Amino acid sequence: MSGNDKKADYDNNADAYRRWSVADNVYWLVEQTRYFEVLGSVRDLNILDLACGEGRISRILMRQGARSVLGTDISVEMIERAEAQNKTKDGRLVYPALRYEVVDACSETFTLDHPVDLVTAMYLFHYAPNEDALNQMCRHVSRNLKPGGRFVVYTINPECDFSRLDPDLLKKTFGFYYRVVAPPHYELVFDKLTVNMWHWGKATHEEGLERAGLTNIQWHSLCLPASHNELARSLKWYMDNPSCIVLSADKPS
Ligand SMILES: C[S@@+](CC[C@H](N)C(=O)[O-])C[C@H]1O[C@@H](n2cnc3c(N)ncnc32)[C@H](O)[C@@H]1O
C-alpha cells in the first residue's frame, strides 16, 4: 500500500458499480470504441492502469498482448475484487504479469522502479477535487512514464453542457446520471452508489499535463463503431453533447 488515507467513494457500495459494469449496456460501445482506437496496439508494452477499479480494462489489455499491467486504485475494495478476478478457482494467477496495488493517483511519492511504456486511465481526472489534485495526478503519470511513453485517459468532457443532459434519459439509456451539486462539483449516480466528481476545463487539463512535462496533448471525440451505425440516430442526443472524451499526451524522448 502506498500512503492512502482517503475514504474512497467506491468503497461505499462497490456492488452497485459491479452490477453496472457487467450489465449488457450500449454505453460500452460509446466508452470503448475511441479509447481503444487511440490506444492502438498494446502488444509487448508495460502498462500502468490508473484508477483500475475491479480490473475490467487491465484484463482487456492483458488479453490484447500487453507484456505487463500494474493496476492501481485508491479503493481497497476495488483492488481486492480485481485481485480475486485474476485468480483461478485453485488460486493460480490467470495473468501472472497482471498485478494490483492500492495507490492514490495523487501520490507524489509513488515511483515505479521501471517507468512504463504506457499509462492508461479509464476515468480518473474528474475525481480530482481541486486543481492541485489534478496537477498531482499529471505529475504521477509523467513520473511513471518512460521517455517516449504515452498517456491515454478517458475522462469527463470539458465542453459538455451538463444542463442539456436529461438525467432520466441518461439513466434509462446508460444506467447512470449526473447530479449538479455546485459546479464544478457534480455527483455521478449509479443505482445505489453516488460518487463525487468535478468538471475541469480544457486549459486546466492541458496546463497540468504540460507542467508535468507531457507534450502532444490531443483530445479525441467519442464515436460509435462503424458496425453499429444504427445507433447513430437513437444516441444522437448524447453524441452531440457527450459527457466524456479521450485525452492523450506523450512524454518526450
Ligand atoms: C468508474 S471507476 C473505473 C474503474 C475502471 N477504470 C473501469 O473502467 O472499470 C473509477 C475508479 O477510480 C478510482 N479512483 C477515484 N479517485 C482515485 C484516485 N485519487 N486515485 C486512484 N484511483 C481513484 C475509484 O476508486 C474507482 O475504482
Image: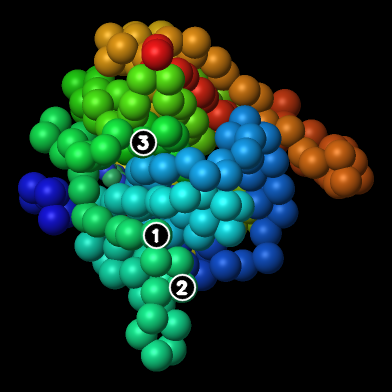
The image's mark for residue 197 is none
Question: What amino acid is found at the position of numbered circle 1 in the picture?
Answer: Leu
Residue named by callout 2? 94
Indicate the position of residue 167 as horizontal and vertical percent values: 57, 45
Judged from the image, the secondary structure of the residue bearing numbered disc 1 is: strand
92 in relation to 21, above or below: below
Q: Which residue is drawn at 37% across and 32% down?
A: 125
Judged from the image, the secondary structure of the residue bearing numbered disc 2 is: loop
Question: What amino acid is found at the position of numbered circle 3 in the picture?
Answer: Val
Q: Which residue is drawn at 65% across and 25% down?
A: 221
Residue named by callout 1? 98
Split into 4 quadrants, where in the image is the C terminus? top left
| Residue 167 appearing in the image | no
| Residue 238 appearing in the image | yes
Labels 2 and 1 touching (C-beta < 8 A): yes
The image's mark for residue 116 is 3
